[in-house]
Amino acid sequence: MELVYWHWIVLGIVLMLAEMFIGSFFIFWFGAAAVVVGLSLVIAPGIGAPAQLIFWTLLSLVFAVAWFRFLKPLSKDVTKAGLSREALIGEIGQVLSVPNGDKRGMVRFPAPLLGSDEWLIMSQDTLSIGDRVSVKDVSGNSLIVVRV
């Protein structure tokens, strides 16, 4: 059986379509390499089957390594979604009402944090209205703050 350009292009498209059902984003690169081999056979149709297979193998390896080494780290999620504690620690806000005794105070942040710009606070420090505070920790639905 002789491998011609359209065999490689069809194989590449099938592999790339299979990636939609697998979701690993690994088979895609084998498909992309097969399409490149098919397109190179359009330009140079005299390449033999063993050379085509070696070219496809090497190209698949290069594409996969390039994806995992260079491109995938660029798409890494650096948001703090789902990490509520980490999203709050270190944020600085202004005291609206002072905590005293068992009553919690209130702080307002310049931008909403996790959907709200006002939060209940507790503090070991003596605070006044208007003081700037930094979030040190989270306790339930209240923030533990220290004066900045």
Image (cartoon, rainbow, N blue to C red):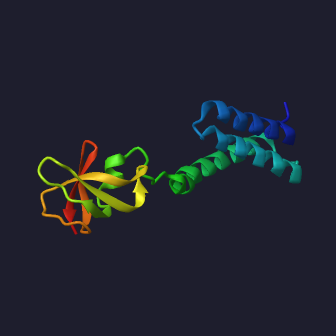
User: Between residues 104 and 41, which one lies in front from this camera angle?
Assistant: 104
Residue 108 visible? The answer is yes
Residue 136 locus on image (x, y percent): 23, 57
Q: Residue at x 60, y 35 (%)?
A: 23
The correct choice, above or below, for 92 with respect to 16 in the image is: below
Residue 64 locus on image (x, y percent): 59, 47
Q: Where, quadrant-wise, is the C terminus in this rendering?
A: bottom left
User: Between residues 57 and 66, which one lies in front from this camera angle?
Assistant: 66
The correct choice, above or below, for 86 with respect to 6 in the image is: below
Q: Where, quadrant-wise, is the N terminus in this rendering?
A: top right
Residue 78 locus on image (x, y percent): 45, 54
The correct choice, above or below, for 5 with respect to 86 in the image is: above
Q: Residue at x 35, y 47 (%)?
A: 84
The correct choice, above or below, for 105 with respect to 127 in the image is: above
Q: Quadrant location of residue 100?
A: bottom left
Q: Residue at x 17, y 48 (%)?
A: 103
Q: Residue at x 25, y 64 (%)?
A: 133
Left or right: where 57 falls relative to 9: left
Disc tally is 0
Q: Quadrant location of residue 38?
A: top right
Residue 4 visible? The answer is no
Left or right: where 103 falls relative to 89: left
Residue 107 locus on image (x, y percent): 29, 58
